[in-house]
Image: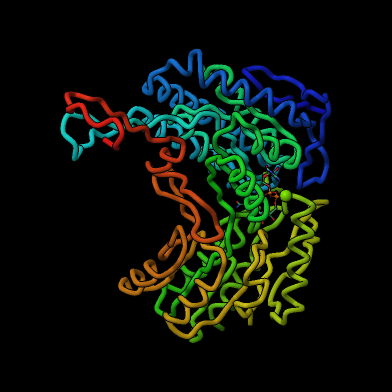
Amino acid sequence: MQRYPLYIDGAQVPSASERWFETENPFTCQPWAEVARGDSDDVDRAARAAHRAFSEGAWAGMSASQRGQLLHRLGDLVARDARRLAEIEVRDNGKLFAEMFGQLNYIPQWFYYFGGLADKVQGAVIPLDKKGYFNFTRHEPLGVVGIITPWNSPLLLLSWKLAPALAAGCTVVIKPSEFTSASTLEFARLAEEAGIPAGVINVVTGFGAEVGAALVEHPLVRKITFTGSDSTGRAIGAAAARHLKHVSLELGGKSPNIVFADANIDDAVNGAVSGIFAATGQTCIAGSRLLLQEDIHDAFVDKLLALAGTANMGDPMLGTTQVGPVTTPQQFDKILGYIDIATKEGATLRSGGKRATRPECGTGRFVEPTVFVDVDNRMRIAQEEVFGPVLSVIRFKDEADAIAIANDSRFGLGAGVWTGDIARAMRMSERIQAGTVWVNTYRAVSYMSPFGGYKDSGLGRENGAEAILQYLQTKSVWINSGAPSANPFVMR
Ligand code: NAI
Ligand code: MG
């Protein structure tokens, strides 16, 4: 079996404990590689290497333009190897090759965009209220950043964090999900090929409690940026607070996809299906609450069931497959558990509701696309993130009702609004408490547009020019250019 060592200070090394763990292919449920099982000793080595690279040597001495050029080169190498990297991701997370290849082909844009931004970070000259001083600001990198990523879109979510962090001049220690370590380790080799100096990017693989927690606790790590579950995010936030570390968190949601009677219904059906069944529902922006205006409810549900019923399940590498397996055994149990909860809560099951055992699914862990109607927004199935192909359909009367239901959630990551009325679209986009609102579309993202959560969906924003500020701190510099000497015992 193939072995993936750690990547620390420009070298592939086994973990200090020389232990390994297996990583499994969710379609076959067979292990396909062994990954180094790191712990706090490895995190310490990596953080020290990252701190050295930040403080001295080639990276520290480089101009922002030179850093930008390295990011461009890295983007080119990802583009060159997009197919190979996408295949590795599918082997580890079981998502459709079409989806992962699409992501891999898009990832270079993050490195081009933030590479281009690297040398356009400018301070300001402040026109002071005091005579005889010159005051200006500089934006300086925070230092070593710990990046903790989940399994659903490993390299895409890594790139959202890594590209602005490197553009800002930071160095990083990456801890990928224990379910999907391989693509991040392969990616680190590309960074080396691009000429990014040793120590700038380090990867420590292993488990959350052993590697992730040690990274959050490490004194040389100045910031943690994380995407994953809200419970782990809260634990990281609390630990970061103890150490006064900067922290960005993206913690998923329970996003409402809201369809008004005046919408283009076929487009909306399409958007509802892509919102929940694409990626087997394993996405932070899943449109897992479908809010339907009562006049169109029944006809809409019929069309939705018809379309969902045509979904091909099976081998994620095949171009004809539309719904792949569930990535992890824990996730599979969680999804089936929520189906049980919804049934007990009194929701009406209209399709799916069980493990898929079609012959094309082989030995994989698949869940049939599942639709519950008669869901009350107070039910757990409407309030908690399932992270699987399970849709909760909720009726609403009018705009005010839709807003009230949509916002009655502790989450606020995304929301969809389907309507033919532009004024209504404007009103809704203003009143929905979510970091992203899509009107007559769903699940669109770009490196250029800010992304992040309201409420319990997280802290901070990724993507767009402002993302680089999350890796910078502002310094104010005062120069006496002729201020009169003053009383030393009072503030100047
Ligand atoms: P998780 O949040 O536990 O794991 C995400 C990352 O955090 C992994 O790299 C993990 O090793 C690390 N981690 C775990 N415990 C840690 C700790 N104490 N300190 C530092 N790092 C730690 O998510 P998991 O267990 O993979 O999935 C559980 C649920 O999380 C899913 O059912 C889903 O609801 C949600 N999730 C949300 C995602 C999103 O995009 N917002 C992505 C993946 C999962
Ligand atoms: Mg976990």
Q: Is residue 194 visible to us here?
A: no
In percent of width and height, residue 319 lies at 62, 48
Q: Which quarter of the image is occupied by the N terminus? A: top right
Residue visible at 56% across and 75% down in the picture: 303
Residue at 62%, 77% in the rendered image: 378
Is 164 placed left or right of 187 in the picture? left
User: Residue 83: image x %, image y %?
Assistant: 59, 34
Q: Nearer the viewer, residue 300 or 45?
A: 45
Count the marks: 0
Residue farthest top in this picture: 57
| Visible residue check, residue 49 | yes
Question: Residue drawn 41% across and 39% down?
Answer: 469
Residue 301, above or below 169: below
Instruction: Check the picture and name the quadrant holding the C terminus.
Output: top left
Residue 42 sits above or below residue 226 on the image: above
**What colouring does the structure picture have?**
rainbow
Q: Quadrant of residue 304?
A: bottom right
Residue at image coords 60%, 77%:
377
Residue 426: x percent and y percent? 33, 69
Q: Position of residue 126 (x, y in %)?
A: 23, 36
Splitting the image into 4 quarters, where does residue 117 fall?
top left
Left or right, 424 with respect to 274, comes to: left
Q: Quadrant of residue 430?
A: bottom left
Q: Nearer the viewer, residue 79 or 395?
A: 395
Q: Is residue 127 left or right of residue 327?
A: left
For residue 22, above or below residue 358: above
Q: 385 or 348: which is nearer to us?
A: 385
